[in-house]
Image (cartoon, grey):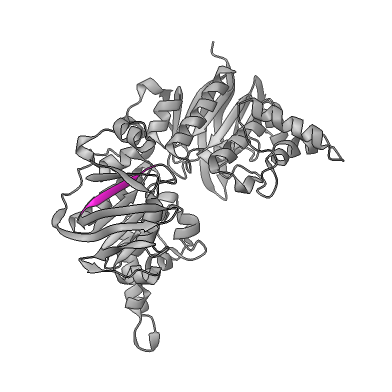
Amino acid sequence: MKDYILRAAGIKKSFGGVEALKGVDLEVGRGEIHCLAGENGCGKSTLIKVISGFHPADSGTIELDGKQFTRLTTAEAIERGVQVIYQDFSLFPNLTVMENLAITMELSNKRKLINWTRMRSIAQEAMSKIGFKADLTERVENLSIAQKQLIAVCRALLYNAKLIIMDEPTTALTKKEVRALFTVIKNLQADGIATLFVSHKLDEVFEIATRWTIFRNGNNVATGNTSELDDKKFAFYMTGRNFDEEAPPPQPDRSKVVVEFDRLSRGGSYQDISLNVYSGEILGITGLLGSGRTELMQTLFGLTRPDSGGIKINGAKARIRSIKDAIALGIGYVPSDRLTEGLFLPQSIGRNMIVSSLQRFAGQCAMLDMKAMNSEIARWTKELGVNTSDTEREVKTLSGGNQQKVVLARWIANNLNVLILDGPTVGVDIGSKYDIHALLRALSAQGLSVIVISDDLRELLACCGRIIVMRDGRIERELQSSATTEAELGEIAAGNF
């Protein structure tokens, strides 16, 4: 008989009459790496909060480490070995590594006086459990996302964790950092510690999980061994939709150069970049963080200025000194962090869509033509499939995929020459990802030049006809997606060639 660390049965949970969980089950074996997948809003996060005692279940039972509960508290969950690492890691950015690791234990032991020697010892013990090294006196706010995540793992292990729940742990990590995290998870498995890995990324399910469970609309859809799963089954279980094979990108018009970089350089960012982007092309750019890929596109969008070299748009020399200059030249930019850089979260869905094109709706005395604006909002809501019945709702109420569609609508509504997308499907569910890819192909077929910056090599190969690999601020290699593989592309991006 299998030894389970977690058995949740018939869990129901409603909020204000809305059923978030409709009687779901979940079993995780001791030392098992189990992936819980599902689109945004399917109930994954609610179940995590029930398992950790944050939310009481309306009905159902939870068995943790052999003990059954009908009403579970956070203290009982921690006592039975449950630790949750949320996406924000719940760290104190203004405190040091040592203080973040030791403070909770000090408080739980009701210490009234600080003993720095003891705190240092606690922190060192925590980091030694996974072989993590960091300056104990460094403030957490100065660390990378990957380092913060490992600190959260170390802190969890201080409490004799038997089940670590990781909520979308790879959203902001590079491929290299993801591999390092997976090594840590597998080492924990060797020590008998189970991991419930919450994700909607198929490649991660195959790479790390031994078993999987998929939710949809608050219900169990399927569960099984990873060996039983493939791309098509995963996509269907997640969305209830059958997806066709993604079509290849349209062929660009190589007789028309839309963007030309001529020996462009900026100290500390990129050097001697000469590159053409053609009409109707979807160009992919990848490389490790620090390769200069994002910095180069920020210059094209007017966020920074080059030290030397030039840029031409449609054959004419362009003076791009500001974002306003870039927009006037028909350049749009979708940043990697839509929440802090791409959206006005307290504002409505509609306002976020048309904020970059307000000038078109300004009539006499600068009065806005509200009828025309609302018609434009309705048009793009329908064309991009934004899942909302009310565009007056705050944009922050939408799922990640629908938020990204709103950002795209903002730029597509303008008469663009070039659309730059940095990590276009980061944090986006599989259905929205497919829709966004189809939209990019449709736009390029209409002659728009699209530049995609991404760590997702599978995405680049699916969307882009040509891929540029950057390294140390320079173009390392130019590849045709039809003549390369994901493995080869990954090796080149990492410099292993």
Judge whether 202 appears above or below 418 on screen: above
**Of 458 and 349, the residue lying toward us:** 458
**Which residues lie in the magenta part?**
281-287
Query: As drawn, which residue projects farthest toward the top?
Result: 1
Quadrant in the picture for the N terminus: top right
Q: Is residue 125 left or right of residue 251?
A: right
Figure quadrant of residue 256: bottom left
Residue that sits furthest to the left in the current view: 255
Q: Residue at x 80, y 37 (%)?
A: 116
- The percent position of residue 213, horizontal first and vertical second, equals 45, 29
Q: Residue at x 27, y 54 (%)?
A: 274
Give the quarter of the image for residue 353: bottom left
| Residue at (42, 29) in percent of width and height | 205
Q: Name the foreground residue: 248 vs 11.
A: 248
- Whether 313 is among the magenta residues is no
Q: How many marks?
A: 0
Outermost bottom residue: 365
Q: In the image, is residue 285 part of the stretch drawn in magenta?
A: yes
Looking at the rendered image, the quarter that the C terminus falls into is top left
